[in-house]
Image (cartoon, coloured by chain):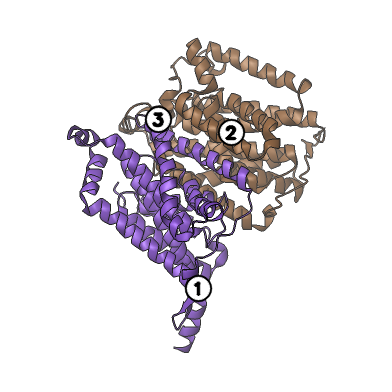
């Protein structure tokens, strides 16, 4: 495989792990900007819209953990996202579980699903890995279509948001927003921490030169599998949070087009960048919001963005900015 | 003996349906394998091009009065030409990059095509009648075989064998196989390899469109008819491995048949059985049944 790889299109990570929480200086500034935006925006914009962005931003970051740092393109992440949504929705509605437990259960089931699927998929790399993850996710889709607890075509509706820790009533959008913001930032920092741990360094070594990592004595399958399970679990948490925000979990969440959407978000923002998926999620969700009335044109435009990104814009929005500023973001 | 005949009467239609599905799996995975062999690109647009084949057949009939037989030849040519355009303008720019970019690009193309058709034709299916010559059925004694279904299986077999013959037994095919192994060397011998890649893509796409025309009278003609189909075909490709042309043909028919059998034994499992088989194959032979590691 000659030439530019997906991972090398992103800015190469440098090795300086310093400063605050493993952030380099530009990243620390970007992170503070991100926190400020998350804190201020609900007073300026519609909170439900912002919560949608945050859920998808976490989903895209989870996806990016695999493609950006292990070099594995999963085309089936909707399975973990959608399963997380169904489980959180079902436990919150049918069993009356509190929101924090429902969301964590969604993440746990996402991770539990990621374990066998990842175990199967990492036997192949590259294009095959993408096709296998897509096929396995389609299996989950058919399962959700037939299983009784998912409500079939109707999905699970009227999911209660409940009371956080038995103290905070989440029925107001503002209260729910702060929970979503917390989940997003915690997930984001967790991913950042994973990537900058010794474990993350091995992942990058595998991405850049797998035979060498093997010859150094690393069991690369184990590393890949753990990364896959973490990614799936975080996708499940994103899905579970989404289910509580919108009070609904449907087949859309497990459909292959959802897997495509998260790929698009990461691609637009910048594959392999830390903040790129967040920017990409914001761009795509905003676009969908404005184009909702145009029906199938959303599909055409999303496809066109895919094509434009691949042909001319492989670094993505944040990748281009980082490249221009000669920093990594 | 009596009970066997009763069993066959029940089973045969489902098995035929399985074979018909298998015919489409074989045609589509064959096209994917041909394109992948030469271009190293997994053509995600394949499902959309299958759908376009069916739609072009419908358009030829409704707008130009050209019937099934004309469409069987014209639709693959038209859709193949669109494929050539896509390869020339977009895919050919990606050969030096990671193969995953080809996957992402063709996925984008699939979204654009499906979206455009949805805009113009909505999401409900359009009817396409079985041609007069192929209506009715044949009584085989133990079952009634609808002529058109038999025709689809027959045409798929013929088309697959023809493709196999062209690639494995003709001079053009030998150029193609040589260019797959060593493109630079073949180019040095004066063969125009880039043009060969373009035409290979066009041919693979034409194969998908041909399958689309065959499918038009069986499934309703709708914009999303290819999208879910192609994911199953991906699983078929993983099971077969893309190493051999014959391998993808055999795997396609086999899995369609297995699906038919599953429909007979335990219907809810029929849609997912292919994915389970994929999982088992990955565990035992990760390179696929006919693949080279």
The span from disc 3 to disc 1 (Cα, nearest Å) is: 50 Å
Q: Few, some or many C-alpha atoms within 10 Å of disc 1 (few <14, some 14-19, many ≥20)?
A: some
Nearer the camera: disc 3 or disc 2: 2
Seen in the picture, residue B135 relative to A257 is either above or below; the reply is: below
- Spot the brown chain and give its letter: A
Could you say which disc has been placed on residue A285 in the image? none
The span from disc 3 to disc 2 (Cα, nearest Å) is: 31 Å
User: Which residue is label 2 attached to?
Assistant: A301
Seen in the picture, residue B16 relative to A81 is either above or below; the reply is: below
Q: Colour of chain B?
A: purple
Which residue corresponds to the image point at 54% horizontal and 11% vertical from the top-left?
Answer: A25
Which is more toward the observer, A195 or B158?
B158
Res. B32 in view: no
- In the image, residue A29 lies at what x, y percent? 59, 12
Could you say which disc has been placed on residue A207 in the image? 3
Question: Same chain for marks 3 and 1?
Answer: no
User: What chain letter is assigned to the residue under label 1?
Assistant: B
User: What chain letter is assigned to the residue under label 3?
Assistant: A
Q: Few, some or many C-alpha atoms within 10 Å of disc 2 (few <14, some 14-19, many ≥20)?
A: some
Q: Secondary structure at mark 3?
A: helix
- In the image, residue A64 lies at what x, y percent? 52, 31
Which is more toward the observer, B20 or B130?
B130
User: Which residue is label 1 attached to?
Assistant: B13
The span from disc 2 to disc 1 (Cα, nearest Å) is: 42 Å
- In the image: residue B69, left or right of residue A176: left
Which is more toward the observer, A170 or A125?
A125
């Amino acid at each position: 495989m000659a030439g530019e790889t997906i991972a090398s299109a992103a800015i190469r990570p440098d090795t300086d792990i310093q400063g605050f929480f493993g952030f380099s200086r530009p990243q620390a500034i970007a992170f503070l900007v991100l926190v400020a935006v998350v804190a201020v925006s609900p007073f300026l914009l519609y909170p439900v819209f912002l919560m949608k962005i945050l859920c998808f931003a976490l989903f895209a970051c989870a996806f990016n953990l695999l493609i950006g740092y292990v070099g594995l393109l999963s085309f089936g992440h909707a399975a973990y996202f959608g399963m997380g949504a169904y489980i959180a929705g079902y436990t919150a509605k049918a069993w009356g579980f509190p929101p924090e437990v429902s969301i964590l259960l969604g993440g746990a089931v996402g991770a539990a699903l990621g374990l066998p699927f990842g175990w199967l998929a990492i036997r192949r790399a590259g294009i095959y890995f993408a096709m296998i993850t897509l096929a396995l996710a389609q299996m989950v889709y058919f399962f959700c279509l037939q299983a009784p607890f998912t409500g079939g075509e109707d999905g699970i509706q009227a999911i209660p948001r409940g009371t956080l820790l038995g103290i905070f009533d989440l029925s107001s959008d503002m209260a729910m927003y702060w929970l979503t913001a917390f989940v997003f930032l915690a997930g984001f920092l967790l991913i950042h921490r994973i990537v900058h741990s010794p474990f993350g360094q091995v992942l990058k070594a595998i991405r850049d030169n797998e035979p060498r990592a093997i010859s150094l004595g690393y069991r690369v399958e184990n590393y890949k599998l753990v990364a896959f399970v973490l990614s799936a679990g975080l996708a499940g948490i994103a899905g579970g949070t989404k289910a509580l925000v919108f009070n609904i979990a449907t087949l859309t969440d497990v459909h292959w087009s959802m897997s495509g959407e998260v790929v698009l978000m990461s691609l637009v923002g910048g594959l392999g960048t830390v903040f790129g998926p967040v920017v990409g999620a914001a761009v795509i969700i905003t676009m969908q919001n404005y184009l909702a009335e145009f029906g199938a044109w959303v599909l055409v435009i999303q496809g066109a963005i895919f094509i434009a990104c691949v042909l001319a814009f492989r670094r993505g929005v944040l990748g281009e900015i980082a490249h221009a500023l000669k920093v990594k973001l | 003996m009596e009970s066997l005949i009763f069993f066959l009467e029940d089973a045969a239609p489902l098995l035929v349906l399985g074979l018909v599905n298998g015919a489409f799996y074989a045609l589509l995975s064959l096209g994917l394998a041909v394109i992948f062999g030469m271009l190293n690109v997994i053509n995600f647009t394949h499902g959309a091009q299958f759908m376009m084949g069916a739609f072009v057949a419908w358009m030829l009939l409704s707008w130009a009065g050209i019937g099934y037989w004309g469409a069987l030849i014209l639709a693959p040519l038209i859709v193949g030409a669109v494929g050539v355009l896509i390869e020339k303008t977009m895919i050919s720019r990606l050969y030096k990059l990671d193969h995953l970019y080809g996957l992402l690009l063709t996925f984008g193309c699939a979204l654009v095509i499906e979206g455009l058709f949805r805009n113009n034709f909505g999401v409900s299916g359009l009817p396409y009648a079985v041609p007069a010559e192929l209506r009715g059925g044949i009584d085989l004694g133990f079952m009634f075989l609808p002529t058109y279904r038999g025709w689809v299986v027959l045409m798929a077999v013929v088309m697959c064998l023809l493709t196999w013959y062209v690639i494995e037994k003709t001079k053009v095919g030998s150029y193609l196989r040589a260019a797959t192994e060593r493109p630079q060397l073949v180019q040095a011998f004066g063969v125009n390899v880039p043009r060969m890649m373009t035409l290979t893509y066009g041919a693979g796409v034409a194969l998908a469109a041909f399958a689309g025309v065959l499918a038009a009278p069986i499934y309703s003609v709708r914009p999303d008819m290819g999208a879910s189909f192609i994911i199953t075909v991906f699983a078929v490709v993983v099971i077969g491995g893309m190493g051999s042309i014959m391998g993808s043909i055999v795997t396609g028919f086999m899995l369609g048949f297995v699906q038919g059998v599953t429909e007979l034994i335990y219907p809810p499992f029929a849609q997912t059985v292919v994915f389970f088989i994929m999982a088992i194959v990955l565990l035992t032979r990760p390179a696929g049944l006919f693949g080279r590691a």
